[in-house]
Amino acid sequence: MFTLDTHVHSCLSPCAELEMHPAAIIAAARAAALDGIALCDHNAAGNVGAVMRAGRRAGVWVVAGMEITSAEEAHVQALLPDEAAARELEARVQAALPGQNDPAAFGLQVLADEDQTVLGYDEHLLSGATTWTLEEVVAQVHQAGGLAVGAHVDRESFGIIGQLGLVPPGLELDALEVSAQTSLPKARRTFGAGQTLLCSSDAHQPGGVGRGKTFFWMQAPTFPELRLALGGRDGRAVLGGGRPMEDLSLHLLDIAQNAVEAGARRIAIEVREDEAADTLVLQVADDGRGMSPDAVKRAQDPFFTTRTTRRVGLGLALFSEAARATGGAVTVESREGQGTTVRGTFGHGHLDRQPLGDLESTLLVLIAGNPGVQVTYRRQARGRTFELDSRQLEQSLGEPLTSPRGLAALRAALREGERRFSEDMDDEPQEERDASGDD
Ligand SMILES: [Zn+2]
Ligand SMILES: [Zn+2]
């Protein structure tokens, strides 16, 4: 499994910050515990090679990419096989891109190497639109051997739907991308459950890298694998994704991953919404090696961490903070040699309560990624209950949940279960925040 942020800009994009030089992008990707990123500058690929080299040094996979503006001013991401393909497509894009940049008005377009040396400036009007129609952009991306992704389709400005009102029927996009403004369950309801949806940050500054991420079920970090995953073919898949800073489901995933690292063989996850009591309870109980009282205290201290492994969310300290902000709390009960139970209680209707995010992603990643661990899941809200036991499902299916058929069955079961609660998921207090991200 690989965690990627498939939409990151560099200092070559006029609207990006100058500190987005190749080495800084890779450092930010590592800090966000990403396996890889896709570099997608506006109508340019001049920094792709440098970011790829910086990535190779640090063990971060970099997908060559570009964000192309169509004549309708809709943004389409091109994810490309390699640097050469990106540079060839760039030449064609820029031949169809009128105008010259005015750095005073739009910003500098810096070409940099992986050692922070400025190599020059791209003179094209990268913030402008090409003369290519949307259909032409997609055809050009495919001709270059790339994958075409409708960028930030949930946003008003520069998304295909924002610009045209809909995704034109017959447009051969390989995936749709939703920005960190929108949770995945909401995106599925809006854009269709059958779509391949990517979550990404559209980062224009280092702190933004990884604010949206997508989990890919692939054998290796290679472009052919990425293509299979987007197409859902040969057992590869996009498992889901989300926003690690705000989706409670990704906090839950992080705590469950801690349990795996503590040697748990069984993990019980509970999500309970009680509207009468105005509480939302998220609980992870495991049979791992447990913690001493002292270690429990330290685990909740934001300034103390012994973690050396990769995390997916922000850990117990921030989970506690998120609960406290809603008038709730996090409790940790742990006994050495017996296991740990982490319970977060949130004010359900509190304005500062973070959205649940995508529980389907959390469970797919946890179960598929840890085939030796039995995961039980129980979700309760408004008198309805959904339960799933990974071992039982596997036994009734007669094959591992990591097989193509197993993964599909697991996803179908989770989606069917979540459907019972779909009304509950409409309540997402942060959904109306201001748009951020690119121009
Ligand atoms: Zn864009
Ligand atoms: Zn962008």
Image (tube, grey):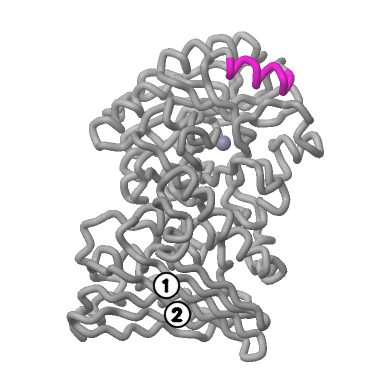
Residue farthest toward the bottom in the current orientation of the protein: 277
Identify the residue at horizontal 30%, vertical 33% (top origin): 55
Q: Alpha carbon of mark 1 to alpha carbon of mark 2: how far?
A: 8 Å
Per the rendering, the mark at residue 344 is: 2
Identify the residue at horizontal 36%, vertical 19% (top origin): 119
Front residue of this view, candidates 410 and 275 = 410
- Mark 1 residue CB less than 8 A from any atom of ligand 2: no
Q: Is residue 129 left or right of residue 354?
A: right
Front residue of this view, candidates 290 and 124 = 290
Quadrant for ligand 1? top right
Asked if the residue under mark 2 is in contact with the one under mark 1, i.e. CB atoms within 8 Å, the reply is yes
* Corner quadrant of residue 350: bottom right
Could you tell me the amino acid type at mark 2? Answer: Gly
Could you tell me the amino acid type at mark 1? Answer: Phe
Front residue of this view, candidates 392 and 278 = 392
Q: Is residue 379 above or below residue 140?
A: below
Q: Is residue 238 above or below residue 11?
A: below
Identify the residue at horizontal 49%, vertical 26% (top origin): 65
- Measured as percent of width and height from the top left, residue 320 is found at 41, 77
Magenta residues?
133-142
Query: Can you say which quadrant of the picture contains the C terminus?
Result: top right
* Mark in front: 1 vs 2: 2
Tag 1 residue: 319
Q: Is residue 35 left or right of residue 230?
A: left
Magenta stretch secondary structure, dominant: helix
Asked if one can make out residue 251 in the rendered structure from this viewpoint, the answer is no
* First in sequence: mark 1 vs mark 2: 1
- Measured as percent of width and height from the top left, residue 64 is found at 44, 25
Identify the residue at horizontal 25%, vertical 37% (top origin): 58
